[in-house]
Amino acid sequence: MQIRPKVLVTRRAPGRAIDILEQLFEVDLWDENRAMPRDRLLDQVRKVDGLYSMLTDVIDTELFEAGPSLRVVSQMAVGVDNVDLAAATRLGIPVGHTPDVLNETTADTIFGLLLASVRRIGEGAAYVKAGRWGPWQPDLLLGGDLHHTTLGIVGMGRIGSAIARRARGFDVRVLYSNRRSDPEAERELGAHHRTLEDLLQESDHVVVMAPLNAGTYHLIDEAALRLMKPTATLVNGSRGGLVDLVALERALREGWIARAALDVTEPEPIPADHSLLMLENCLIIPHLGSASVATRKAMAELAAENLIKGLEGRRMTACANPEVYE
Ligand code: GLV
Ligand code: GLV
């Protein structure tokens, strides 16, 4: 009898991904409606060959030591800041992720968040649900405009570019602040490169899409927020760690900027009694960037495909540490 590789799946994924894995491997599925507790993860990774992970799992040297037979990690997310990639590479473990399939959905969500914040749509909805809607008022919930403004995108990658394309339909001028200028973004999107400081000063609205790493942690801190316009909107669509929430709360209370909209927070989830949730000019949604039925299914299936290829010794379709193949 052929021995089937063992796989640990840390959360039930949408679509057929798990069924596909079960046809090929011996699958151990954490089937609860919460992230796998750390001690269970460290215990259950002990004898597995492959790990199908979520962004809520911390995958570090402690985990690799707990699972000495682990050969492949495949995460159902594009961001892999929860994975110690250098350690994985040292151990020869390819780490799969799910880029591209989520670009358009995430751009829809983050652009929608920007529009909702600027035009105070969340506040309006809360106002009606609270039973406060009276006769029409000429000055009720007046907000800013998105059309014909300048949008700064911090981190013009695949999702940032998709946001820039949407912005062009609103006659918005796009600035971006990657470390290096990106001639393709300039040609195709009409975007202009700026230093982060110049972008923060010139933009009417700022969207943060840069990945989280040691160099981008708290990129948006007090100094950055103080450079922004008092009428500006800040949107974080990347990872909570990019924005210092203590500084952001002061900025919103003291009017250094007008409003913020966050799809991600640090910590995540944000505690229900967090003082930021008291602010009307702060719109927060629970990490929904890629959360469409079709896109989550595509991510789950791409993650399954990466895991299968990895365990079969083939090159993954999307690998976050391609150095492992060198
Ligand atoms: C979601 O945030 C992802 O990284 O896919
Ligand atoms: C607003 O609804 C208007 O008709 O001006």
Image (spheres, grey):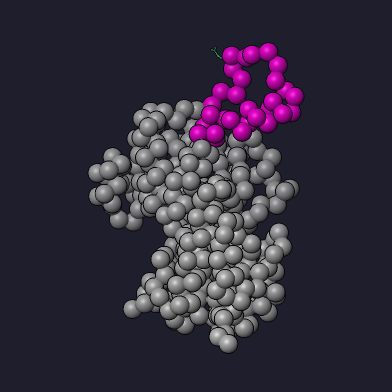
Residue at 49%, 72% (x, y): give it.
Answer: 308
In the foreground, 141 or 224: 141
State the count of labels: 0
In the foreground, 18 or 315: 18
Residue at 57%, 81% (x, y): give it.
Answer: 4
Q: Specify the quadrant that holds the C terminus.
A: bottom left
Q: Which image quarter: residue 200?
A: top left
Q: Position of residue 159 (x, y in %)?
A: 42, 49
Q: Is residue 129 left or right of residue 212?
A: right
In the foreground, 230 or 5: 5
Q: Is residue 235 above or below residue 21?
A: above
Quarter holding ligand 2: top right
Residue at 42%, 70% (x, y): give it.
Answer: 316
Q: Position of residue 128 (x, y in %)?
A: 69, 25
Residue 64 shows in the view: no
Q: Position of residue 300 (x, y in %)?
A: 54, 59
Q: Which image quarter: residue 325?
A: bottom left
The span shown in magenta is 115-143
Q: Is residue 275 left or right of residue 156?
A: right
Residue 124 shows in the view: yes
Residue at 52%, 49% (x, y): give it.
Answer: 294
Q: Specify the quadrant that holds the N terminus.
A: bottom right
Residue 123 among those drawn in magenta = yes
Q: Position of residue 106 (x, y in %)?
A: 49, 47
Q: Is residue 34 left or right of residue 169?
A: right
